[in-house]
Amino acid sequence: MTDTVHGPAPAKAGSPGAGAGSRPADALAIETEGLTCRFGDFVAVDGVSLRVPAGAVYGLLGPNGAGKTTLIRALLGLVPATGRARVLGLDPARQAAAVRARVGYMSQRFSLYPDLTAEENLLFYGRVYGLRGERFARRVDELLERTGLTHHRRTRAASLGAGLRQRLAFACAVLHEPALLLLDEPTSGVDPGVRRSFWDTMYALADTGTTVLVTTHHMDEAEQCDRLGMMLRGRLVAEAPPAEIRARYAGGGSLAEAFARIAAGLAHPSARPSRDEATG
Ligand SMILES: Nc1ncnc2c1ncn2[C@@H]1O[C@H](COP(=O)(O)OP(=O)(O)OP(=O)(O)O)[C@@H](O)[C@H]1O
């Protein structure tokens, strides 16, 4: 079942009339070529060539252990990788600190400090990013408001419900107004209503030009992305907008069906369909 998580897609930054400013239409926020991560003999990410357009919401899917988290960690320079990678034009292997200053990262295990209040968590992360002064104080207030946490600002993170903790982690990740957000299963373990409001917030952000790379196991969320990449055993085996994935692999059926077919090798992932096939 497709559970629509936001209304009609807003005009995206970079599209005509969206006030995209000077960014070229074909600018890439992430570009990798043959990116490979090995842990000993095990290849967790296997020659991934990925292109994420600036301003896009890009969904990364794949079964547990497919290599999504490792790929994200490589983009942050947190695990060694071979091949080529550019994140906002920077090389994460050699410019990791500069990458992390421009990127917001929400890991699967939200790294909140349980004994600190919601506000103290934000203040802590802000200081880590070097934020100070009145502008920072206003940013904290604004994020508490936008994430519905104003009334919980003095509540310890440990005492917040799962949905509120998730929103607090999101607020911490966007404090420094990153140009790129890497979100690793941000909605795991929260109910559909909370997931919906999370995606609304994320889309509002993307509409201001932020690029989002998000991993998810939820097909309703995948459906809302501008593009999807499917990973299997470390490889990027399918890559296209959701409608094209459905057309190419499931004859216009559901995304779940399309991914099941890709995983079963029923549609050859590298097969390039004719235009007619792809459009139904
Ligand atoms: N530091 C590490 N050392 C050894 N193996 C690792 C390490 N990190 C990840 N792996 C392995 O790499 C593979 C890919 O893991 P990864 O966490 O990237 O997958 P994933 O697609 O994010 O899965 P999930 O959806 O469960 O989060 C797994 O087999 C995992 O056990």
Image: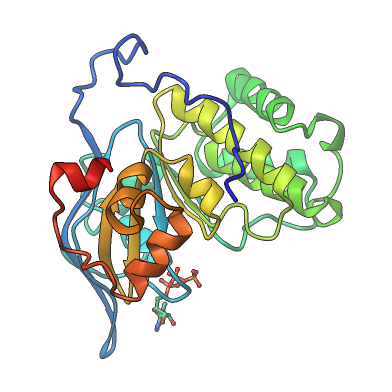
Above or below, 234 against 209 in this view is: below
User: Could you say which quadrant of the image residue 270 lies in?
Assistant: bottom left
**Number of numbered discs overlaid on the protein picture:** 0
Name the residue located 51 percent from the left edge and 24 percent from the top edge: 8
Name the residue located 26 percent from the left edge and 65 percent from the top edge: 237
User: Could you say which quadrant of the image residue 73 lies in?
Assistant: bottom left
The answer to whether residue 209 is left or right of residue 169 is left
Residue 142 in sight from this viewpoint: yes
Residue 87 in sight from this viewpoint: no
Question: Can you give x and y, in whole percent of width and height, for residue 167 in the image?
Answer: 68, 43
User: In this view of the protein, which residue sits in the foreground, 26 or 179?
Assistant: 26
Question: Can you give x and y, in whole percent of width and height, for residue 280 in the image?
Answer: 28, 43
User: Could you say which quadrant of the image residue 271 lies in?
Assistant: bottom left
The answer to whether residue 88 is left or right of residue 155 is left
Name the residue located 29 percent from the left edge and 12 percent from the top edge: 16
The answer to whether residue 229 is left or right of residue 81 is right
Name the residue located 37 percent from the left edge and 45 percent from the top edge: 242
Question: Can you give x and y, in whole percent of width and height, for residue 219 in the image?
Answer: 52, 53
Q: Residue furthest bottom?
A: 41
User: In terms of image quarters, where does ligand 1 lie?
Assistant: bottom left
User: In this view of the protein, which residue sits in the foreground, 40 or 126?
Assistant: 40
